[in-house]
Amino acid sequence: MSPKRKKGSSRHRRKRNSVERLVPKRWGRSAAGRIGTAAVLGALGTLVRKHPLIAIELAGAGLKKAGKVGVAEIKETLIAADGKDLPS
């Protein structure tokens, strides 16, 4: 005979997706952090659902900027290391 479960047990809870699991680990250390993170994620969700083309343009612009910064950092490291041993 199996033990009886309390009402509200985990059996009836829905599974959280990966973003919902990630939020408390990274940004949910305080109540203000959780509130702010929920607001940002809600705004991003609305943007993606209602304006997907704008969301894609924003993501592309972010990737472009990240690429430029990465290339600049590599170039700076190589120029600084010219004639010197690379740090290990």
Image (cartoon, helix red, strand yellow):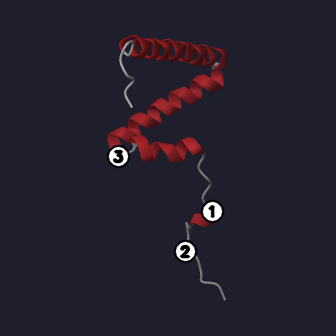
Amino acid found under the numbered disc labelled 3: Arg
Identify the residue at horizontal 58%, vertical 44% (top origin): 18
Q: Quadrant of the N terminus?
A: bottom right
Q: CA distance from mark 3 to mark 1?
A: 26 Å
> What SS does tag 3 mark?
loop
Q: Label 2, on which residue?
A: 6
Amino acid found under the numbered disc labelled 1: His
Q: Quadrant of the C terminus?
A: top left
Q: Label 1, on which residue?
A: 12
Q: Please state the horizontal and vertical placement of residue 79, each as a whole percent of the image.
A: 40, 10
Amino acid found under the numbered disc labelled 2: Lys
Q: Are marks 3 and 2 in contact (CB under 8 Å)?
A: no
Q: Image check: 20 left or right of 73? A: right
> What SS does tag 1 mark?
helix
Q: Please state the horizontal and vertical placement of residue 34, each as a whole percent of the image.
A: 40, 41
Label 1 CA crowd tier, 10 Å (few <14, some 14–19, many 20+): few
